[in-house]
Amino acid sequence: MNIVVGIATAGRREQLWRTFGELARQKRAPARVVVCPAALDDYDPACGALLACPVHVVHGPRGLTAQRNLILAASSDADVLVFFDDDYYPEPDYLDEVSRLFDARRDVVVATNRPLLDGAVGPGLSHDEALQALELAASLRPAGAVLPTYGGYGCNMALRMAPVLHHGVRFDENLPLYGWLEDIDFSRRLAAHGRIVKYTALRGVHLGSKRGRTSGLKLGYSQIANPVYMLRKGSLSFGYALKHLLRNVAKNAARALWPEPWVDRRGRLKGNCLAMLDLARGRIAPGRIRHLK
């Protein structure tokens, strides 16, 4: 099976060295790694020497969806494309498990799993903390289970490329910059052609680095605008969209006076309010974050 790894990166040049070091520990090396940096300085070509496979670099406009589409276009010969975030450390048998799953379950089109630890929901994890978590988990390996799930988690998401190419499924570039829910949108459109599953044997740690992230104001706007946009185009159910809207607005409002040091709650809440005002005016659109300052 021809497995390609794709990484879209922005503002994390030093981190990418460490991520490549962890990729080098895979028991099954990928056919190649395709990297799409948001800027020329975001990727140091020297770090490719850490890997036992070729590294292909593609360049294009900044924005997670646009960068991932360039990676898709550069991976048309792959059987499976595995998207990793630039701060995700997979366990050494991750790609082995991908091969095993996609070979045995021909109806699976997207496979994902929740990280063992996810720094995205907290202050973020250090390199050493991530390695300690992987070391601890290595001694605890329950049998892998294949479970239905609503959508892939973009920090680690494996795609069967045949239906992606045949049906022309792409990431929606109307979701700019950080993309917010772009992984769910893509998964739900691909769900018409196969199963979306959580495979518990796909294990790793997501550092959740805060560098290179979208501002709180813009992210807050996207938290409202993106689900509304997806709901209108039919890639998101009403229940799923409403759950995200209510949860994020409630959390931002509740923590605005006592925000976590690593989260711009006030900026996010302001973005939420601007988006709801635009919704009432009938002009809400994900792309409006490009003009927010």
Image: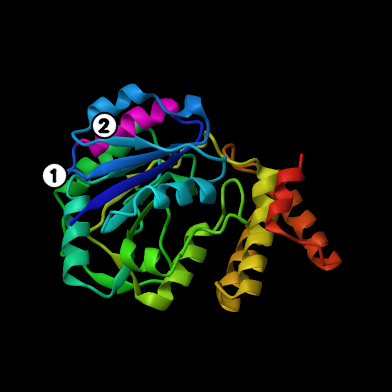
Element type at mark 1: loop
Q: Magenta includes 17?
A: yes
How many tags in the picture?
Answer: 2
Q: Magenta includes 131?
A: no
Element type at mark 2: helix
- 268 left or right of 121 in image: right
Picture coordinates of residue 150, whole percent (x, y): 43, 71
Rendered image quadrant of residue 293: top right
The range drawn in magenta is 13-24
Q: Amino acid at mark 1?
A: Lys
Q: Is residue 80 visible?
A: yes
- 133 left or right of 35 in image: left
Question: Which of the image's four quarters has the N terminus?
Answer: bottom left
Picture coordinates of residue 245, whole percent (x, y): 64, 65
Q: Dot 1 corresponds to which residue?
A: 27
Q: Residue at x 49, y 27 (%)?
A: 40
Q: Residue at x 38, y 68 (%)?
A: 166
Picture coordinates of residue 68, whole percent (x, y): 46, 49
Q: Nearer the viewer, residue 1 or 132?
A: 1
Q: Is residue 256 visible?
A: no
Q: Amino acid at mark 2?
A: Gly
Q: Dot 2 corresponds to which residue?
A: 21
| Magenta stretch secondary structure, dominant | helix
Seen as rendered, the residue at the extreme right is 281
Picture coordinates of residue 257, whole percent (x, y): 71, 46
Crowd class of label 2 (few under 14; some 14 to 19; many from 20; radius 10 Å): some
Q: Residue at x 56, y 59 (%)?
A: 172
Give the CA separation, mark 1 to mark 2. Answer: 13 Å
